[in-house]
Amino acid sequence: MHSLDAFAQEKLDQLESRSLRRGLTDTFREDGIFVERGGKRLLSFSCNDYLNLTQHPAIKAAAKAAIDRYGAGSGASRLITGNHPLYAELETRLAQVKQTEAAVVFGSGYLANSGIIPVLIGPDGLIVIDELAHNCLFAGTQLSRGRVLKFRHNDVAHARELLAEHRAAHDHALIVTDGVFSMDGDLAPLEALQALGEEYDAWLMSDDAHGIGVIGGGRGSSFMGNAHVPVPLQMGTLSKAIGAYGGYLCASAPVIELMRNRARTLVYSTGLPPSAVAAAIAALDLIEREPAYAAAPVQKAKVFTASLGLPDAQSPIVPIVIGEADAALSASRLLMEEGFLVAPIRPPTVPQGTARLRLTFTAQHPMDEIERLADIVRTRILA
């Protein structure tokens, strides 16, 4: 065996021994909630398509029309010839939704976070980041070469301690958090973090991938209730509730112009296909027109948590923490036998000892099936 193959096989065997090896499974998504896997039809509670817009006729029609007019791909990076006219419309709409001066769209959420942070923070900078922030936020911090300090999850007092001790030694500082945490479904204390940032001249950046479209009237996690937290760096994705693909940053006009000039993941990446941009525009229009529909995923998640006696859901994401990876796999297989697709989430995506079932609720999930799922979880998994 070639040494490269031997290296790869050893790593795979190690993952297998810890029930951490993953694999790709062909999945045919029929209509937004039902999927077919291995010849079996399953009701999916594992997709981030919270509003089922990937299958919405109006969204698909917009994507098809864009292909007919602009072609299948953009052909180049945005700074060369890949900046097709639809981009300007989408960025204007995103800035309106987030109530900022401007916006810029990236190729994906991972590309956005990997590109944004290094533009703002260099080797002399400081990043204070929630310990449960998404992997791509940590990727951006590593690329920045700045000093990175983790604060305990949603612990503003701990973040304050870190800034009080270390802020003065650095030229610039960034506070980084998810708006909605992807594996726990809870919300960041954005108002308190924004006030902390103002106190220490530390710029707050929130990743609202799982908030836009379904939280705060569809505007996202910085618009909860009747409040608007003016987070200066509002990042998110177009691939979850929006139902298309891409990432974005909403911020002031100077910050956005700087990103267009210096964010490597924008400058050196081919632009998004016109179909993806057109689909995102149509999705934002639909969310604005139908706020009750946008609120449905969180409402259905609350029905599920109430049925199980769990804390009230704050987002469409509800975790059922199992513990060990093999136990989470077994629980997922049990639910599959009952006709549900609920993927097990294992380390390193979540901390050791917290492998879980991560359930995501969508606008079109039938209420009777939510109740049936809750009953199975209560009597056969948590019992």
Image: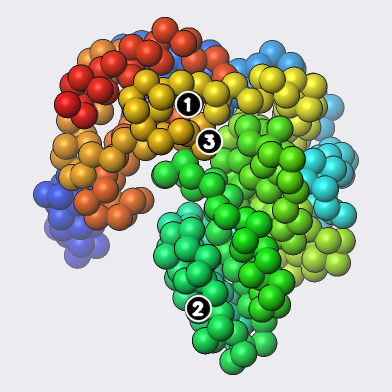
Among numbered discs 2 and 1, the one appearing first in the sequence: 2
Q: Is residue 247 above or below residue 48?
A: below
Q: Which mark is residue 76?
A: none
* In this rendering, position of residue 70 left or right of residue 312: right
Circle 2/circle 3 CB separation < 8 Å: no
Q: CA distance from mark 3 to mark 1?
A: 7 Å
Residue located at (69% from left, 39% from top)? 225
Cα–Cα span, label 2 and label 1: 35 Å
Q: Which residue is mark 2?
A: 161
Q: Position of residue 80 (x, y in %)?
A: 81, 56
Disc 1 marks which amino acid? Ala
> Who comes first in sequence, dot 3 or dot 1?
1
> Which one is in front in this view, the residue at disc 2 or the one at disc 1?
2
Residue type beneath disc 3? Ser
Q: Residue at x 57, y 64 (%)?
A: 176
Name the residue that disc number 3 marks. 315
Query: Percent from the top left, x then y, of residue 213?
Result: 66, 33
Name the residue at the left extreme.
17
- Asked whether residue 295 is in view, the answer is yes
Residue 36 in percent (x, y) is at: 38, 15
**Is 336 displayed left or right of 269 in the figure?**
left
Left or right side of 243 for 219: right
SS at circle 3: loop
Q: Nearer the viewer, residue 99 or 43?
A: 99
CA separation in Å, label 2 and label 3:
29 Å
Which element carries disc 2, helix, strand or loop? helix
Q: How many marks?
A: 3
Task: Give the residue at x 36% y 32%.
Answer: 310
Q: Amino acid at mark 2?
A: Glu
Q: Which quadrant is home to the N terminus?
A: bottom left
Name the residue tied to disc 1. Answer: 301
Is the C-beta separation of discs 3 and 1 under 8 Å? yes
